[in-house]
Every structure is written in C-alpha cells, then in structure tokens.
Amino acid sequence: MDTRQLRYFVQIVESGSLSKASRQLHIAQPALSQQLAKLEDEVGKPLLHRSSKGISPTENGLALYHHARFMLRQLEQALSIARSETGAVQGMVSVGLPATTVSAIGLRLVKKIRERYPSILLNVVEGMSGHIGHLMRLGQLDLSVLFSADIAPDLTIEPLLVEELFVMVPEHSRLVPPGRTSITIAEASRIPLILPTGSHGLRQRIAAEFENRGLPTNVVAEIDSLSLLMNCVYDDIGATIKPMGAVMQEGARGRKWRCLPISDARFRRRNFLYSLPPERLTTAAAVVANELKETARELVDGEAWDGFEDISVLRALEASSVMI
C-alpha cells in the first residue's frame, strides 16, 4: 500500500464513481480500477459497494477513508513544514461556519490569521449547521462552530459563546410600531415571519418555544439562504428571528435595522467549537482554534454589539425553560 493508492481511494469515495474520479485524477479508468483492486486485495476485504447508482464505501471502506484522508493531510503538512525556510507555522486549515457566524466573526478571523500567521492557508466553509456537522463527522473539516454539543461526540467540543436571538425588522418597517425597544412573544406570534425551513435547528427550536406557550407562528416564507432571507425582511415582507450576527455586515450596505429582544422569553443559542481530537489536530489548526476563541471573546467583551454573552452563563441557561 502506498500514498498514491490512498489518494486514489479517497478521490473515488468522494466522487461516488470511478469515471468521475478518473477525470479528477487525470488517470485512465482501467488503471484506476487496477489500483483499487490492488488495494482491496492488500486489505483483504471489499472496500466499496458497486451499483448502477454509483459507488459507496463499505463499513471497512469508510473506516479506511477517514484514516487515509487524515494521513494524506498530515503528509502534506509535514512536507510543507520540511520545505519551509522560516520554520513558521503553516498549512491549510478548514473551518466550517454557519452563515450568521461567518457574518459575526468571519472577517475578523481571516484578518487575524493573515496578519499573524501568513503561512497558514485558511479555508472557510459556509453552510447550514447540519451540513457543517456532516462535514465535521466525515473529517473534512479541522474546526467548526455548531449549536449543539452532541453532533459528533468523538471530537473535541468546547463551549464558545451564547447568542441572544432578536426579532429583526428594518428601521423603516411598519410591522412593529416605531419607538418599541422590545416585543413580547405573543406579539411576535402575530407578526408575519420569514424563517429557515423546518429542517433547520433554529427553526425547530423557535417553533417549540411558541408551541410550548400555545402560540402559532405566522410564517409567510421559508428561506435557508441568509442573504435572501435578510433581503426579504428588508423589503418588509416579514420579520425574522435571528442572532445579531445576521445584521453585523449590513451597515456596510447602508441598511439600518431594529433588533428587538423578546421581553418575556429571551431566546438564546449556545455556540460550541468542535475540533479534531488532539492526536489528529495539526499545529496550524490548533493555532486557528485559539484565534477563533480569542475572536469570540472580543465579541463578548466588546460594546459595539449586543446579544453576545460569556459561556459562563450556560449553567443558568440550562435551568431556564426559555433557552433554545
């Protein structure tokens, strides 16, 4: 077994077919099939399920895929360090962030890494939390920020911060009377809302809180794209319920917002930092993790934005029926 065979195998699994993998690897399909057969012969077990719909890994194949992908990344990191003339921390680090988290800390994090560790290539992957969690479980990310502590229990999990959720409308909105600085949950239930789809964790938790109080939700649109959702809210089609991160980059676009706390049911969302186990975490990834935590602390300690709280409030929140 050699690294070339492992690289081929990883590409086959990720492509889902030999033909796609051969195009990605720029190798003839018969030669690729031969390398795969040699690998399976050496392992002594079938590594792939083959069907008319494509290829998927067997249980043994999936285990090999995860370890092979990690080994290949470690090899790339080792070669990068060996070739370095300065001995600086370097390598690629993949970080998965949900859209509102990108808005809250993405730019600050990229700037920090670029200024302090120019030899680190930061790969930021934005997506819904479910997709980010899936990539983290597959080992395709080094770090991620997620909103539950039970998504991947075999990884390192650290509490990061707590976000308050606000009812958000544009400054010119007619949905909430001017001068109001907060809103009750009953009032929020009567406002037309634009929320993520039902598969989204945030939507499920909001719905549960309304249902617990016997209140309906007046949902007029379901949108998983943060940018489109906020555009619709700005056009006053409906309000939304989001953390402050949703509007933190809106000022640069000249758009002003009203972010109203729910006075009788302060919604909060916990953020957790996931990382690969210490034995699999590269030096570069550990550095980025520390910078990410520092960025979160600055957000909590700063006075520029409301709605971010230190993780020390978690125990109190866990005893509260209004935390989501």
Image (cartoon, rainbow, N blue to C red):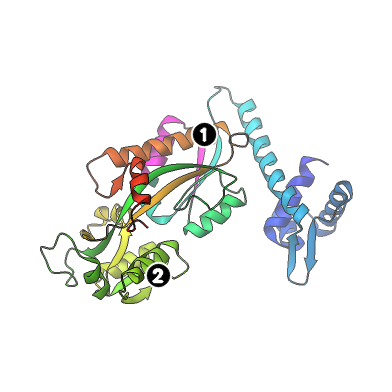
Tag of residue 223: 2
- 117 drawn magenta: yes
Residue sitting nearer the eye, 324 or 98: 324
Number of residues whose C-alpha sits closer than 10 Å to that of mark 2, classed few (under 14), some (14–19) or many (20 or more) = some
- Farthest top residue? 86
Q: Mark 1: give few (<14), some (14-19) or many (20+) Cα within 10 Å.
A: some
Res 286 label: 1
Residue 51 placement, left or right of 239: right
In this rendering, the answer to whether 108 lies above or below 307 is above
Q: Mark 2: which secondary structure?
A: loop
Q: Secondary structure at mark 1?
A: helix
> Which residues fall within the magenta stretch?
107-125
Q: Position of residue 124 (x, y in %)?
A: 48, 48
x 65%, y 31%: residue: 78
Residue 225 percent location from the top left of the image: 41, 65
Say whether residue 194 is magenta.
no
Count of numbered marks: 2
x and y, in percent, of residue 314 in the image: 37, 45
**Gap in angstroms between the C-alphas marked 2 and 1:** 34 Å
